Image (cartoon, grey):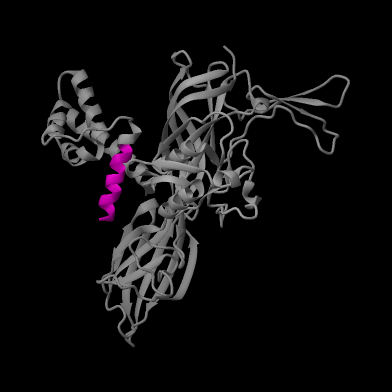
Amino acid sequence: MRSALLLGVSTLLIAAAVGAPIPPPTAREATQLIEKLGSEDYAEREAASKRLDDLGLLALAELRAATKSDNAEIADRAKDLVRKIERRASNDRALAPTIVELNLKDATLDAVLAELSKQAGCEVVLDGLKADELAAKKITVATTGKVTFWAAVLKVCDAGGLQIAGAGGFYSAGSAPYTVIRPANGVARRVAANPNSAVILEAREGKKRPASVHGGVLVEAFEVPQASSTRLFASAVLQVWPESKLGWQYAADVKVTNALDNKGGKVLPDLTHVGARPQVKPVPGGKVVVVQNADGTITIVNPDAKNPVMVGAPFTPNVRQALVKLKTGPGTASELTGSVYGLVRSPPEPLVTIALVAKEEVSATGHADTATEASLRTDADGKRFVIVKLSYDPLKVHPARTGDDLADVKPAAGGNQTVHGLRVTDADGNAFDAALIRASNDFDPTRQGRIVLSMKLELPVVKDGPTLPTKLVFWGSYAKPVGVPFTLKDVSLVGGSK
């Protein structure tokens, strides 16, 4: 059931990523489209490929079968489409959003945010200098059915004249960490119990920010600080707001696929590399030094001063920001389309699953290239053991901890019953309270950066406990690259020249 739900969400996200809703296929549409992949007409082949790509998971089964077609053109195109659709589906599962529904009339903002927090399992609160005044403001908000968490947040912001001040411990440009401001006496306003995981809203100052939602991620556009603008390119800052459950690590890159100026003309992205060595130029007759930065800005430094003043330093995005650069002048991009690429850490999930067989060594490889070997043993006294060899990259994979919540697993009183992420169960899914008897670790001599853990786990026999051990699962989280598509309207650009 859970897999089916995830696939359903992925399909919805894929539809959202391309803009308009995708009509469901007819009974034979996918089959007919696949036949057209082998058409002698190039335009017909391309049109069929695009429609099948749009259908995504709805056509995946037929496309997998078509990869074995005797027609080389059909087989090759089907293989390309299967790879694209599966990669996109995997990406969207990693960014799967929390779904909520709001329908409140003449409710205080604080009450609306309390309901949103309850449904989302995430604190959403007001803060800032006008928070007390806003908390009592009455609004009407209806999401018209179930929507993603960030779509609901934007709906509330529109109704209440709000904007995002911060999320997950990061703050937007121009917003201060207001979490120290407490409600005035007599004011009923919720405050964040943990500001580092909460979404914090404040009164909107100025115009509404361009925003785009994809799954569990919101992308907003901000102006680059004027002091960091450059004549080499016009730029804007993209702020990534992920849901806290996504475990966002950092934004690695941004790719602009389409940009239009305020007259509808096409604008090209600027690919100037900012990492070149700066040029240092001493000012004649003084101790001040002018540093010419690689992106065209300058830094002015007095090397002898205890606190040198820097002016015009290049803008450096944080781990939740990306810098867009365009070959145009200051003004507005009427439309900006592309993707922000980043890294997220998955929640704890089964990385490797092994069916245990008595006296036999079984091996398997799972997600994030994690490898496990295991064998079930019984000694002369009737005690049962599992001998395990676990191999993974510790920079990518983190074994589940005993306090972690495991999907579809009801934690026992003592935790999730894992040992270094390993969980042994019987045929009915009952977990053994395994004990670590022996452990050693070493670096994998054949693969750089990987470690190998050798462990011996005892499986105690208790009354009314698990029966015969049948399955070993290695639970853990792993770093996964993702892409967040965005389409932003009326983005302010700073710097650059015509």
70 w.r.t. 171: above or below: above
Quadrant position of residue 213: top left
x and y, in percent, of residue 365 in the image: 33, 56
Q: Is residue 247 visible?
A: no
Q: Position of residue 90 (x, y in %)?
A: 34, 44
Residue 194 occupies which quadrant of the picture?
A: bottom right
Residue 153 screen position, x and y as percent = 45, 42
Q: Main secondary structure of the magenta part?
A: helix
Depth check: 300 or 172 in front? 172
Which residue is situated farthest in the right direction here? 285
Q: Per the image, is 446 magenta? A: no
Residue at 23% across, 23% down: 46
In the rendered image, residue 453, in percent from the top left (x then y), is placed at: 45, 64
Q: Is residue 96 above or below residue 341?
A: below
- Which corner quadrant holds the N terminus? bottom left
Magenta range: 1-14
Q: Could you tell me which residue is drawn at 51 percent across and 31 percent down?
A: 209
Quarter of the image where the C terminus is located: top right
